[in-house]
Image (cartoon, rainbow, N blue to C red):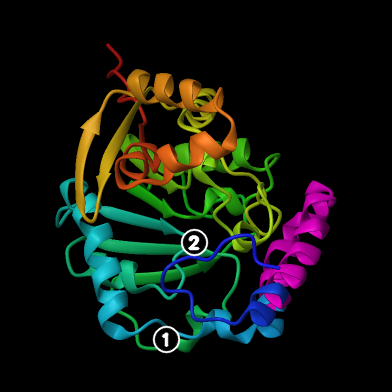
Amino acid sequence: MIRKSLPGETRTPIQLREHYEIEKELADRLRQSSKEERSHLYAALYDELFRRVPHLTQHASSARRQADVAIQMRLLRPFLDETTVFLEIGPGDCSLSFAAAEIVRSVYAVDVSAEVTKKYPVQPGNFNLILSDGSNIPLPPESVDVAFSNQMVEHLHPDDLPGHLRSVWEALKPGGVYLCVTPNRLNGPHDISRYFNTVAAGFHLKEYTFHELRFLFQEAGFSKMEAYVGGAGRYFRSPMPPIIWLEKFLALLPERIRMPLAWNPLGRGLLGIRIAGRKSVRRASL
């Protein structure tokens, strides 16, 4: 039985249940794995998911995908220019990376699986696709100006996130920025388990709050963190403390009260995590 339905969902209850059971099975293997096992499991299990649930690789309509890319580019555009080396982590079908390639000097797209991206053999000349173990960023130190991930860090094993953030920090040039977009646990879960469960049980191995991510960014070495609030392509820079206070208030409420507040348009605009962590500029030695 489906716990709740969402607008725009076209799959049948049987398809949703099948997807949930398969993804939960595979995600449990990741949750219980060692760090050494995860170095190959990320790619293997995602490839298996795409094979066993083939509709996941079906493309959205061209108009829908273009609209999604346009929304993400409105968030990214202030960070990009013709000199930028841009890194997208978890690029999916690479549509956003291709759009960024029209603006920036060069683009790197890092992913764990080629099952989706290999269907797009025609690539811009300044674009490079790189496969990763799911945690590390296999790029030279201080080679990237802007790093971006959208709906990616929640897919990492919680034990791997600190290493991922440190790896991004090392790849960034001094003054570089990592813009991370991820769902907030307080109005989740946001993976397939939202139809059946109150906590993420699928490939969202952990959903976070602003408060948790700010601490992890600081631990990785980022010197300054800012939030971006809004939606539908209209975003505004915000200090972190007011949002963290809101999170603490909502966390005290029972789910039946919290979810209507956290899931309405205002709540989603404030709680949707868009956090920009900046690497400090080193002072020149005297």
Whole-number angstrom distance, CA of label 1 to CA of label 2: 15 Å
Q: Which of 179 and 121 is in front in this view?
A: 179
Residue 33 badge: none
User: Residue 234, how many percent across, how many down?
Assistant: 18, 49
Q: Which amino acid does label 2 sit on?
A: Gly
Residue bearing mark 1: 120
User: Residue 62, how many percent across, how many down?
Assistant: 29, 84
Q: Which amino acid does label 1 sit on?
A: Tyr
Q: Earlier in the sequence, mark 1 or mark 2?
A: 2
- Quadrant location of residue 39? bottom right
Range drawn in magenta: 18-47
Whether the magenta-drawn stretch holds residue 24 is answered as yes
Residue 90 badge: 2
Position of residue 60 in the picture relative to residue 33 (left or right): left
Position of residue 241 in the picture relative to residue 2 (left or right): left
User: Residue 17, how many percent across, how many down?
Assistant: 71, 73
Give the prevailing secondary structure in the magenta stretch: helix
Element marked by disc 2 = loop
